[in-house]
Amino acid sequence: IFSATLLFAQAIASAFGYDLTVFGDELTEKFNALLTFLSAMGIIVNPTTSGISDSEQAMDYDSPR
């Protein structure tokens, strides 16, 4: 959603003669850093399983599917 919103804003700004490319790149870097931090802290977890661990089915995999 973030990327789509940023792309839409850049398209609208471009239509009016503004260049948001550098602003968009900086914003994307900050957003990616935030997501990395949240993932490392365990705040972003897999929504398809309850809790923060893998499902029993995933624990039985010998290799990724």
Image (cartoon, grey):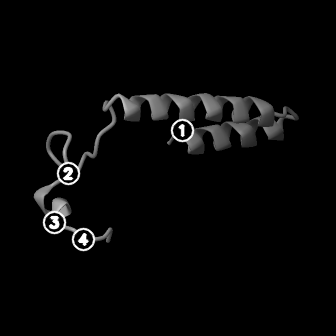
Instruction: Give the quarter of the image for residue 52.
Output: top left
Local SS, label 3: loop
Mark 2 is surrounded, within 10 Å at the Cα level, by few (under 14), some (14 to 19) or many (20 or more) other residues, namely few
Whole-number angstrom distance, CA of label 4 to CA of label 1:
35 Å
Amino acid marked by disc 1: Phe
Residue situated in front as seen by the camera: 17 or 43: 43
Amino acid marked by disc 2: Asp
Say which residue label 2 marks.
Answer: 54
* Number of the front mark, 1 or 3: 3
Whole-number angstrom distance, CA of label 4 to CA of label 2:
14 Å
Looking at the image, residue 54 lies above or below residue 13: below
Mark 4 is surrounded, within 10 Å at the Cα level, by few (under 14), some (14 to 19) or many (20 or more) other residues, namely few
Whole-number angstrom distance, CA of label 2 to CA of label 1:
27 Å
Task: Residue 6: give x, y in percent of width and height.
Answer: 63, 38
Residues tagged 4 and 2 counted as in contact (Cβ below 8 A)? no
Say which residue label 3 marks.
Answer: 60
* Number of the front mark, 4 or 2: 4
Say which residue label 1 marks.
Answer: 2
Q: Quadrant of the C terminus?
A: bottom left
> Image point 54% across, 38% down: which residue?
2
Local SS, label 2: loop
Whole-number angstrom distance, CA of label 4 to CA of label 3:
6 Å
Local SS, label 4: loop
Say which residue label 4 marks.
Answer: 62
